[in-house]
Amino acid sequence: MATLETQYKNWLKENEPITYSEWLEKFSEIHHLDKLKEPTMENKQTAVEWLIEEIHKNMEFIPVHIQEQAKAMEKKQIIDANEDSSTNELGEFLTGEQYYNETYGKI
């Protein structure tokens, strides 16, 4: 995938010159980057949960078994990646399962 700077240079070859910041603003509008949200404690969700939600907004159906399989795979990856390497507010080490439950509020 080309970098934004490369895409900007390619765009300039075929269009009237504009500044990089003007182009970046147009790029953001076209690709709806202004609608991306940073996760907060209120809307914290895994990447797979976010993707499923976004796809549902634009498509009619994703089979439930595919959704559940993707969520299970991601949960395992998160748990494995955080096994005995994360701490809570008190500095206590957490298991991967504890980290997942505290971060995403799920069992």
Image (spheres, grey):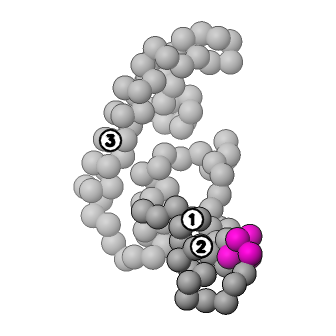
Q: Residue furthest front?
A: 13
Instruction: Report the side of 76 relative to 11 (left or right).
Output: left
Q: Looking at the image, which residue is at 52% across and 61% down?
A: 3
Give the magenta part as a residue range. 19-23
Name the dominant secondary structure of the magenta segment: helix
What's the residue type where badge 3 is placed?
Ala
Q: Position of residue 5 (x, y in %)?
A: 59, 65
Q: Mark 2 sits on what residue?
A: 8
Q: Secondary structure at mark 2?
A: helix
Instruction: Report the side of 55 relative to 21 (left or right).
Output: left
Q: Looking at the image, which residue is at 74% across and 70% down?
A: 21
Crowd class of label 2 (few under 14; some 14 to 19; many from 20; radius 10 Å): some
Q: Is residue 32 visible?
A: no
Q: Secondary structure at mark 1?
A: helix
Q: Mark 3 sits on what residue?
A: 72
Q: Nearer the viewer, residue 72 or 6?
A: 6
Residue 1 is inside the magenta segment: no
**Quadrant location of the C terminus in the rendered image:** top left
